[in-house]
């Protein structure tokens, strides 16, 4: 196993397979984690592997700033066969008890949120196909900017970009980009619905409402925040030195790191706004 700088590995890590394991910088591995790969496992920078996570398979790559809850699993039935492969982009989230089966290839794009209990299956079989029972094997592709809060995805499904799947939905067919889908089986309720484009005035209103919430509910009596619509930038003013700038259009942060800027960065994240910036040596670094 090759580890990057400043990683954290908790207790009782079990490495069972003979494949190469590559961990990026600042990767955190929780308690009682099992890693079992026959060829390769790559986990990129600043990713968090939750407690009691089982990762098994043949060829797995997980992108930057992946986060997982506890008792998740990657692998399952047939995960060591030649057809097994997993690619996960950056900013992906796998909630508690999430499961990704990799009997066939799974490709998950960037900024994909898979909520608590989300299950992704690339094969479904138990009773004999010779008696007419359903047996299905097939890949799954999930695009960029997709939210699946507690859904089930069946084999041979492609989900496009900018899609929201309703809680508890069972996805059995392709979902086109920009859709809102829900139900069992999942059906498209709204087409070409995401992303929505707001006027500058509406966007300004949304940002100011967010900042008001931050000032009232997260950090009481904060007054050193300023939003400029022309640059689409939120500034955190400091008593000494230049402000820290949160560019909402460029998705980057420039300036010094303080407890307040980290609270603001986290609250933006909780509202779905993520930045390609991370704190290091008391300033924000771009990636």
Image (cartoon, grey):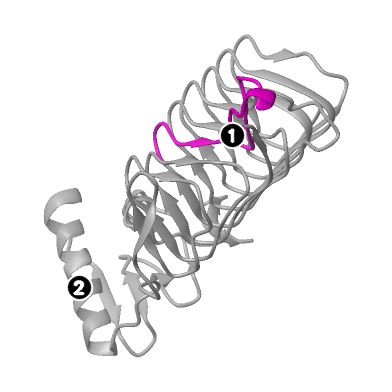
For the magenta stretch, what is the residue range? 115-134
1 magenta-colored: no
User: Is any part of residue 169 visible from this angle?
Assistant: yes
Judged from the image, the secondary structure of the residue bearing numbered disc 1 is strand
Q: Position of residue 170 (x, y in %)?
A: 42, 42
Question: Residue at horizontal 73%, vertical 43%?
Answer: 105
- Towards the viewer: 74 or 104: 104
Furthest residue in direction top, as rendered: 12
| Position of 207 relative to 44 (above/below) | below
Q: Do the residues bearing badges 2 and 1 touch, measured as CB atoms within 8 Å?
A: no
| Position of 39 relative to 267 (above/below) | above
Q: Position of residue 143 (x, y in %)?
A: 57, 60
Question: Residue at horizontal 31%, vertical 69%?
Answer: 237
* Residue 100: image tag: 1
Q: Quadrant of the C terminus?
A: bottom right
> Counting residues from the N terminus, which is met first, the one under dot 2 or under dot 1?
1
Q: Position of residue 236 (x, y in %)?
A: 32, 67
| Position of 35 relative to 189 (above/below) | above
Question: Residue at horizontal 45%, vertical 36%?
Answer: 118
123 magenta-colored: yes
* Residue indicated by mark 2: 208
Q: Main secondary structure of the magenta part?
A: loop
């Amino acid at each position: 196993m090759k580890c990057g700088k400043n990683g954290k590995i908790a207790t009782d890590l079990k490495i069972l397979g003979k494949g190469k394991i590559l961990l990026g910088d600042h990767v955190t591995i929780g308690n009682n984690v099992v890693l079992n790969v026959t060829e390769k496992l790559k986990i990129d920078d600043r990713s968090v592997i939750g407690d009691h996570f089982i990762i098994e398979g043949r060829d797995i790559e997980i992108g930057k700033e992946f986060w997982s809850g506890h008792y998740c699993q990657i692998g399952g039935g047939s995960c060591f066969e030649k057809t097994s492969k997993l690619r996960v982009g950056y900013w992906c989230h796998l909630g508690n008890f999430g499961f990704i089966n990799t009997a066939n290839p799974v490709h998950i794009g960037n900024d994909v949120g898979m909520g608590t209990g989300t299950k992704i299956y690339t094969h479904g079989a138990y009773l004999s196909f010779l008696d007419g029972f359903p047996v299905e094997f097939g890949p799954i592709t999930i695009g960029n900017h997709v939210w699946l809060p507690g859904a089930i995805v069946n084999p041979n499904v492609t989900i496009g970009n900018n899609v929201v799947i309703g809680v508890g939905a069972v996805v059995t067919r392709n979902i086109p980009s920009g859709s809102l889908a829900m139900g069992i089986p999942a059906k498209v309720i709204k087409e070409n619905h995401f992303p929505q484009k707001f006027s500058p005035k509406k966007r300004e209103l949304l940002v100011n409402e967010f900042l008001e919430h931050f000032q009232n509910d997260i950090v009481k009596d904060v007054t050193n925040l300023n939003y400029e619509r022309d640059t689409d930038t939120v500034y955190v003013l400091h008593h000494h030195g230049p402000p820290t700038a949160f560019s909402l259009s460029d998705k980057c942060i420039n300036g010094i790191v303080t407890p307040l800027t980290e609270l603001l960065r986290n609250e933006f994240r909780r509202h779905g706004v993520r930045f390609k910036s991370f704190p290091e040596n008391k300033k924000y670094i771009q990636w």
